[in-house]
Image (tube, rainbow, N blue to C red):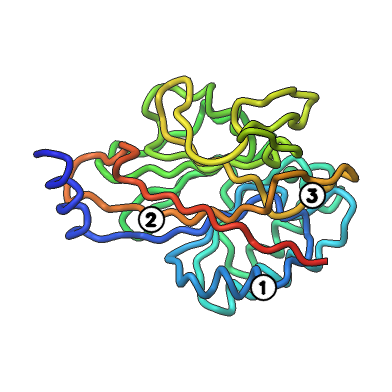
């Protein structure tokens, strides 16, 4: 089957639209909720730092409650900022009460694919998908953790954490968390060390006083083409949109 035939068969089998939210840091982002709902996604995948180590959690809860009120499926893994908080256990319980699927080193079947996630305090080597021909989607906060996965663990990995490198010049981020200079994973679609596909969001919020430069907010929209049979891990089966959300103060 050539590439065109394979894409056609994928379309025949169905498509899932996923909105990737990362690093909101409990900020108010005007129009973000309406933008996500307006995309009419099948699900919203949140890859950590939904909350912030010091900011009130209220804006994050309002955002998530808005998604749930729109009857959207929401999946979530923790980032480092959740773990800075004393009340992290209560935050996760409140998310669960809203109907959010909190993934703490676990995997669920959803709409014809498998979704797994690891919290920030867990190394992802232990994540196990079932033996399946279906797409295996992995949520993780720190994209560098993906390099520790064994080959072909996931069909696609979603991550954030690096905030695009804070200042971006010539499509290269300059600095990331942990004093990383010129981080290799900052924005968009990558191949990991093991050859897996990974999308890294530049994020939707900030915790640093240092302003972002040439680094707009990032709301990746991913269309997963569901294969009729066989694993679908190739980037040609993946259309990744990058829709910056307008900054409003
Ligand atoms: Fe962050």
At label 1, counting other C-alpha atoms closer than 10 Å, the crowd grade (few under 14, some 14-19, many 20 or more) is: few
Q: Which residue is mark 3?
A: 206
Q: Closer to the N terminus: mark 1 or mark 3?
A: 1
In-front residue for pair 216/223: 216
In the depicted structure, whether residue 45 falls above or below residue 70: above
Is the distance from the Cβ of mark 3 to the nearest ligand 1 atom less than 8 Å? yes
Q: Closer to the N terminus: mark 3 or mark 2?
A: 3
Is the distance from the Cβ of mark 1 to the nearest ligand 1 atom less than 8 Å? no
Q: Residue at x 48, y 26 (%)?
A: 192
* Left or right relative to 18: residue 50: right
Q: Position of residue 33 (x, y in %)?
A: 63, 71
Looking at the rendering, in which quadrant would you find the N terminus?
top left
Q: Secondary structure at mark 1?
A: loop
Q: Position of residue 125 (x, y in %)?
A: 52, 26
Q: Which residue is mark 2?
A: 223
Q: Are marks 1 and 3 in contact (CB under 8 Å)?
A: no
Q: Which residue is mark 1?
A: 31
In the depicted structure, whether residue 229 falls above or below residue 152: below
In three-dimensional space, the C-alpha distance between marks 1 and 3, rounded to whole angstroms, equals 17 Å
* Left or right relative to 94: residue 155: left
* Left or right relative to 225: residue 120: right
In three-dimensional space, the C-alpha distance between marks 2 and 1, rounded to whole angstroms, equals 22 Å
In-front residue for pair 136/105: 136
At label 3, counting other C-alpha atoms closer than 10 Å, the crowd grade (few under 14, some 14-19, many 20 or more) is: some
Q: Residue at x 70, y 37 (%)?
A: 168
Looking at the rendering, in which quadrant would you find the C terminus?
bottom right
In the rendered structure, find residue 187 and report the number of the disc placed on it.
none
Q: Residue furthest left?
A: 1
* Left or right relative to 197: residue 215: right
Q: Secondary structure at mark 3?
A: loop
């Amino acid at each position: 089957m050539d590439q065109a035939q394979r894409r056609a068969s994928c379309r025949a089998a169905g498509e899932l639209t996923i909105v990737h939210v990362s690093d909101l840091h409990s900020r108010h982002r005007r129009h973000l909720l309406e933008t996500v709902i307006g995309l009419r996604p099948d699900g919203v995948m949140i890859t950590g730092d939904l909350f912030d180590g010091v900011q009130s959690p209220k804006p994050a809860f309002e955002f998530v409650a808005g998604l749930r009120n729109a009857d959207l499926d929401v999946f979530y893994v923790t980032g480092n900022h959740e773990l800075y908080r004393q009340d992290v256990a209560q935050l996760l319980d409140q998310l669960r009460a809203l109907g959010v699927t909190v993934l703490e080193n676990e995997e669920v079947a959803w709409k014809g694919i498998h979704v797994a996630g690891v919290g920030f305090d867990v190394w992802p080597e232990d994540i196990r998908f079932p033996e399946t021909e279906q797409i295996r989607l992995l949520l993780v906060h720190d994209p560098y953790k993906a390099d520790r996965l064994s080959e072909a663990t996931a069909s696609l990995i979603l991550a954030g954490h690096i905030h695009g490198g804070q200042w971006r010049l010539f499509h290269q981020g300059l600095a990331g968390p942990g004093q990383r200079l010129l981080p290799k994973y900052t924005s968009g679609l990558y191949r990991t060390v093991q050859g897996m596909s990974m999308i890294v969001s530049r994020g939707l919020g900030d915790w640093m006083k240092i302003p972002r430069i040439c680094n707009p907010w990032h709301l990746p929209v991913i269309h997963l083409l569901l294969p009729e049979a066989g694993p679908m891990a190739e980037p040609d089966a993946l259309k990744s949109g990058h829709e910056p959300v307008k900054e409003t103060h």
